[in-house]
Image (cartoon, helix red, strand yellow):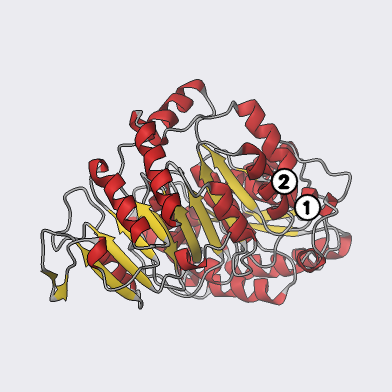
Amino acid sequence: MDLNRLFHPESIAVIGASPHLGGGKMPYYQVLQMAGYKGRLYPVNPKYTEISGVKVYPSIDDLPESVDLAIASVPAGRALEMVEAAARRKVKFLHFFTSGFSEVGDFALEAAMLAAARAGGTRIVGPNCIGIHCTRSGVTCDIPKTPITGIGNVAFLGQSGGMTHNFMRMAHSRYLALNKIVSYGNQIDLKVEDYLEYLSQDDTVRVIAAYIEDIKDGRRFIEVLKKTTPRKPVVVLKGGTTPQGARAAASHTGAMAASHEIWAAVMKQSGCIVADNFENMVDLTMMAVSDPLPWGTRIGFLGAGGGTSVLFTDLSSQCGLNLPELCAATQSRISERIASVNTSTTNPVDLGFYGFDFTIMAHTIEAMAADDNIDVIIPYFSLDFITSFQKGQLETGPHAIVEIARKIHKPVIPILSQFTENMLDLEDVRIRMFSLFRKADMAVYRTPQDAIASIHGFLAWQLARSRDQGADSASLARSQADPPASWQPRL
């Protein structure tokens, strides 16, 4: 299905545009202006003659052209007449922000809207959703706290408008560059599989994340998913996997949610990466766009403290990952910069007090990268202790880690540990280090659990992908070394 004019509209009409912000309505007209949309933008509202000097049209029928996209922020009682007018004017896509349809039991209204739209060839986004975002075209449904810069490689499909907003905000804070976003709500016409199919063929999108409450056409969804996952990772978070959650989903978007057991089996067979919660979905998305990517199960861990090393080893083992002993030459090289008291060079590497020194951490990372037994390197930075004992390195030290990470050819996945939660100075250090590491294309996590879960999820996808005979050679060529065939992800 060609959705190009949805994401790249040359003209947009905002129905219900108002000079007044607030009042429970998304100010789409002003949002599009602030986002820098360069196409032809028409405010529509019979209550006003102008907004900030721009002519306001009383109705869709009064517009000077048939627009590519109309955004309707009107009461549900006027929804059918809006669809009829859009179909009459041959509007290509009509997005309904409005709620009050099947989620409150009004299936008849949705059916009437769909029939009217199909009579004129208009396609409906929603209703009951916040719509679309496309960085390249300047169309958006949100103005984030941080500016949108560059054309990203991350796409997101969200059945919930709130979850879509949350993803966009967290993505910006994690330095995930957004490409295309769809909040699709009740999906009475265009469905999640339509958007998924379009994004699967979009070479500017590297990973697709999705929050899903229900599927309208299960057979087609699975078919599209199986064609997509060999090409790029699809990270899915399912809402409504419990009886109570299913009832909440029904009142939210009119969703008829499937059982957790059926859903999990379908996702596994389709090659998806299944997220356990919202934060895990964002973590997995960040892993999928890091560079270089993890392609092996052999982990090298370094940090300060034996207890942390032990717990990290336990967590890794539970996920089917392993920490092989470093070769003698690697251990010898690490020992050049540290004493032998209260330290260990085997793997996990416990640098003791030296683990708070960025230069020694960088030296150890470089030594571990030369070891043929290691696929992924995870340095553990204790911000509590670093800010106490290495304040002199806070400006230059993180840059040393970035320089080494760029020099070697194995993924470096830092953990920025922080246990003091009520000090702004320490949080400022975390934000600055996180920003530096992320801008160097490293996936960065707060806890060992988050890092291990993300590595495990990505490797599970890569294993399924490498076994899929339909995986195209171009995307497989990105792989340095697939997970061993004997490895089984611990789900």
**Which structural element holds mark 2?**
loop
Mark 1 residue type: Arg
Residue 371's place in the image compared with 170, above or below, is: below
Q: Is residue 243 visible?
A: yes
Mark 2 residue type: Gly
- Residue 28 located left or right of residue 441: left
Q: Which mark, residue 271?
A: 2
Q: Nearer the viewer, residue 268 or 479?
A: 268
- Residue 111 located left or right of residue 331: left
Residue 139 is situated, as x and y percent measured from the top left of the image, at 39, 67
Q: Which residue is mark 1?
A: 465
Q: Quadrant of residue 290?
A: bottom right
Residue 202 is situated, as x and y percent measured from the top left of the image, at 61, 66
The answer to whether mark 2 and mark 1 are in CB contact below 8 A is: yes
Q: Nearer the viewer, residue 283 or 163?
A: 163
Q: Residue at x 17, y 68 (%)?
A: 56
Q: Is residue 28 visible?
A: no
- Residue 284 located left or right of residue 41: right
Residue 76 is situated, as x and y percent measured from the top left of the image, at 27, 42
Q: Earlier in the sequence, mark 2 or mark 1?
A: 2
Q: Residue at x 36, y 76 (%)?
A: 39
Q: Quadrant of the N terminus?
A: bottom right
